[in-house]
Image (cartoon, coloured by chain):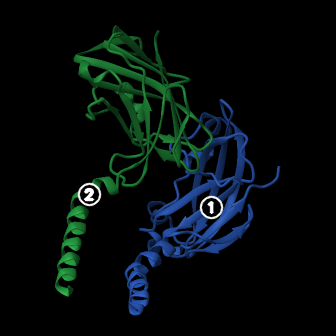
Chain colours: A green, B blue
Amino acid sequence: MKMVRTILAVLFAAAVLYGMQYTRPLYSDITSPIVSSGGMNERIEASTFAVSLDRVRVARALNIETFGKSKPYTSSGVWIVAEGEAEAKFETLSLTSGEWLDRNGIRYVLTDRVPATIEMMPGDVYQPGLPRRILLVFEVPEAAIADGTVVVARTKLMPLDDEIRIATNASDQNIESAITIRRNEEGPPWTVLP
Amino acid sequence: MAALLIAVPAALAVHSWGDIQDWRAEHVRNPVAGAVGQAIDYGGASWTVSRFTRLAGSEGRAIVLAEFEAVIPDPQALAAIPCEVRLSDGEGREWRPAFLSDPVIRRTYPEALERSLCGGPTFAATEPGKPAKMAASFSIPASARDLTLSIALYSARPAYLSFKEPRS
C-alpha cells in the first residue's frame, strides 16, 4: 500500500512539473507592457499618459510641403497618416515609440523617410496638463491596413511600462491617391490638408 | 517548515537590501526650504534663487522662469555632479525644464538666456567664490497652483533645495 502511495505521489509530482513546464509564460510575456486599449475619438488613459486619435487616413502617396516646396513620397505599399492628441499626466515625458499593428500581429514602426514624423521623435516632450497634437505616419503593405491598431509607448524597450492601443477604422476600401502634409513655421507644427 | 517562515523573508530582505539602499539614496525626500533672495548652504555651495516668476504664455499656458546662483568655494569638486531642476504643483504634477525657452522670455527677460543650465559643466566653468549663474524655464498650464521649485545635486541627495512660488 505504501509503495502504491509513493508511486502515485511521484506520478502526481511529475504531472504537475510537466504541466508547469508547458504553461510557463515566456519572459517576454512576464515583462510585457501594461496595455490600455480603446477606439477612435476616445481618450485612452494609461497610468502616466493619455492618447486619443481622431483621424486615420490611407493614401498611395504623400506630399510634404516645407517652405512652399512640395516633395512627393511614393511607396510600393501605402501610407497611413494618423492624427490625435497626447498628454502626460503627472510628469514631463517623451513618447518615442509608435507602431502600426496589423491583424496578424505584425508591427510596423513609424516611418523614418518622412521628416513630418519628427513630432514623435526623442527629445520631444509632453508636459502634464498641456495636451499636444500628434502625427503618426506609417508605411505598410496594403494587406496590413484593415483592422490595424496604433500602439504608442514611451519607449520600445521598457518592460512593464504603459502601452496604449487604439483600434482604428482604417479600411483598404478607402485609399486616397495622395495626402498633403504642410510643415508650418508658426502655430501647430503641421497641417494635414483635406 | 517553521524555519522556512524565517529563512525565506530573511533571504528576500538580504537579497533586496542593496536595491532598497540604492532606491533610498536616489530619491529626494529631505527638503531644505528657502525663500527667493535668501542664500542657503546646500551640497557644498551657497545657493540663491534671485527670480521665480510666472509669465503669460500662448494657448492657455504659463511660462515659469527661475533664475538662481551658486557660489562654490571649490568648483572642480562639483565638476562631474549632475543637477536636477523640477517644478511641481499642489496636485503632485511635476515638470522638467523646457528645452527651448519660450518667446515670452526672450521678450521680457532676455538676460536670462545668457544663463547656463544647472550641472557640472556650469560649475566647472566658474571661478572659486564667483557665482555660477543659472536659469530654468517651464511650460505649464495656467491653472496650476501652489508651485514649488526644487533643485537637487546628485551628490547631496536625498536632500534637495525647495522654494515655494512667491505670492504676487
Q: Position of residue A143 (x, y in %)?
A: 24, 20
Asked whether A181 or B69 is in front, the reply is A181
**Residue B74 is at least partly visible in this image:** yes
Mark 2–mark 1 Cα distance, whole angstroms, equals 49 Å
- The amino acid pointed to by label 2 is Thr
Q: Which residue is mark 1?
A: B150
In the picture, residue B102 is in which quadrant? top right
Up-down relation of residue B62 to residue B18 (above or below): above
Q: Position of residue B145 (x, y in %)?
A: 74, 49
Asked whether B36 or B131 is in front, the reply is B36
In the picture provided, is A95 more to the left or to the right than B64?
left
**Quarter placement of the N terminus of chain A:** bottom left
Q: Which residue is mark 2?
A: A23
| Element class at badge 2 | helix
In the picture, residue B90 is in which quadrant? bottom right
In the picture provided, is A140 more to the left or to the right than A164?
left
Asked whether A30 or B37 is in front, the reply is A30
In the picture, residue A172 is in which quadrant? top left
At 69% from the left edge and 33% from the top edge, which residue is drawn? B60
Chain to which the residue tagged by mark 2 belongs: A
Q: Residues within 10 Å of mark 1 (few under 14, many from 20)?
A: some
